[in-house]
Image (cartoon, rainbow, N blue to C red):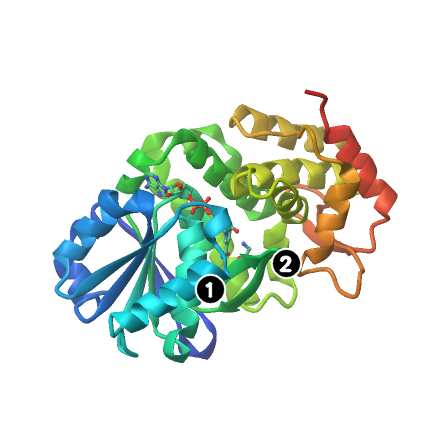
Amino acid sequence: MAQRIRVSAPHGEDYDIVIERGILADAERLVNEFGLGGTVAIITSETILDLYARPLAQSLPNAKVFAMADGEQHKNLATFTMLQRQLAEHRCDRKTTVVALGGGVVGDTAGFVAATYMRGVRLVQVPTTLLSMVDSSVGGKVAVDIPEGKNLVGAFKQPAAVLIDPTVLATLPPVEYRCGMAEALKHGLLADVTLLEPRLHAPDQIEAFLERAIRVKVDVVEQDPFEQGLRQTLNLGHTFGHALEQVSQYAWKHGEAVAVGLVAAARLSSRLNLLDEQTATQIEDLLAETGLPTHFHQYEPEALWQAMHTDKKWQSGHSRFILLEGMNRAVVHEDIPKEEVIAVLASMRRDE
Ligand code: NAD
Ligand code: GLY
């Protein structure tokens, strides 16, 4: 059954998230209901080009397709500049709608292009990974990475709509599906334990699962759209996760790094006597049962600690971690001693 979630956003930029099988193939509605009848710039990745971008472009009256290379290592300023120049070469104007069609890498990059091209054009997010459906397409954060850190250059750009067609998940590689589960389970830990129940993970429950996972994020971004406080809790596991991505030069996928980060956050919470050990173990078991990594090889805890310093939540060198004081009780903690963090990381490092 189709679902629609209305999101209140600042400055009256409210938008709908539509979860509906087949919505991507319904050109009439895309044009009449979601404003894709004018000039449309579909920004996508090489993998999505033939699968979904070309068919979508052919069904719309005036759409052009621009493809970036796949992978986090291409979510950068070079790709951003290339896309900006391509839009200009193809005479895209202020009335152009950018459609971000792909996973979170495309959504973040294309979103930042839309936020800045001609000082901002309309953006429609069409996420095609589980991760981008439950997380990155919602809430308006768009960014690219620079060598000094992840997501360090970006903007807040609310989409005019988020269109989710769950049928596209059929082509998603299992490892990418698991990555999306990491963010969805994070939402379960933050605010909705139903998301942790295996019954909701069955393929025939996907719409209900998506809706519940998205509602957790919507609830937070409506209260704190510019991350002044509460929204920081959505970064549960991300301080560790981003460090792992960065130190591995993005060999680690975001969702897998977040899974390890969730284990680290649970272990650190337990070590600081905020969370009972049993709950921390339950979280670790749940991630392992989902097929997600719960430890890492190779990297030095000290190197991970250094990489954490580019975390945007940290201020003037003061550390800031999102920790759990129980299920659905995430709290921001500052100035956690380095030795505690290093001890947790050392406990998660396995010899190959
Ligand atoms: P991704 O965008 O790299 O996609 C993963 C892979 O799946 C890619 O190779 C892609 O081409 C392929 N793919 C996508 N959809 C497919 C489909 N339907 N069928 C077959 N293949 C498909 O990775 P991701 O996990 O979607 O996104 C991770 C990114 O999202 C990171 O850069 C992360 O920082 C960002 N993120 C942003 C926010 C935010 O609020 N803006 C939140 C969470 C994550
Ligand atoms: N993914 C964290 C946020 O959107 O704030």
Mark 2 nearby-residue class (10 Å; few <14, some 14–19, many ≥20): many
Identify the residue under disc 1: 140
The one of 222 and 44 positioned closer to us in this rendering = 44
Q: Is mark 2 within 8 Å of ligand 2?
A: yes
Residue at the farthest top position:
352
Any part of residue 214 in sight: no
> Is residue 220 left or right of 273 when viewed as pictured?
left
Residue 258, percent from left and from top = 59, 41
Any part of residue 251 in sight: yes
- Helix or strand or loop: what does disc 2 sit on? helix
Residue 190, percent from left and from top = 59, 47
Q: Which amino acid does the dot numbered 2 rest on?
A: Gln
Residue in the picture at 17% in, 49% down = 55
- Helix or strand or loop: what does disc 1 sit on? loop
| Rendered image: mark on residue 232 | 2
Q: Is mark 1 within 8 Å of ligand 1?
A: yes
- The answer to which quarter of the image holds residue 38 is bottom left
| Rendered image: mark on residue 171 | none
In three-dimensional space, the C-alpha distance between marks 1 and 2, rounded to whole angstroms, equals 14 Å
**Relative to 294, residue 105 above or below:** below
Q: Earlier in the sequence, mark 1 or mark 2?
A: 1
Residue in the picture at 27% in, 77% down = 93
Which of the image's four quarters has the C terminus?
A: top right
Which of the image's four quarters has the N terminus?
A: top left
Mark 1 nearby-residue class (10 Å; few <14, some 14–19, many ≥20): many
> Is residue 281 left or right of 152 when viewed as pictured?
right
**Relative to 118, residue 325 above or below:** above
Q: Which amino acid does the dot numbered 1 rest on?
A: Gly
Label 1 with label 2: CB-CB less than 8 Å:
no
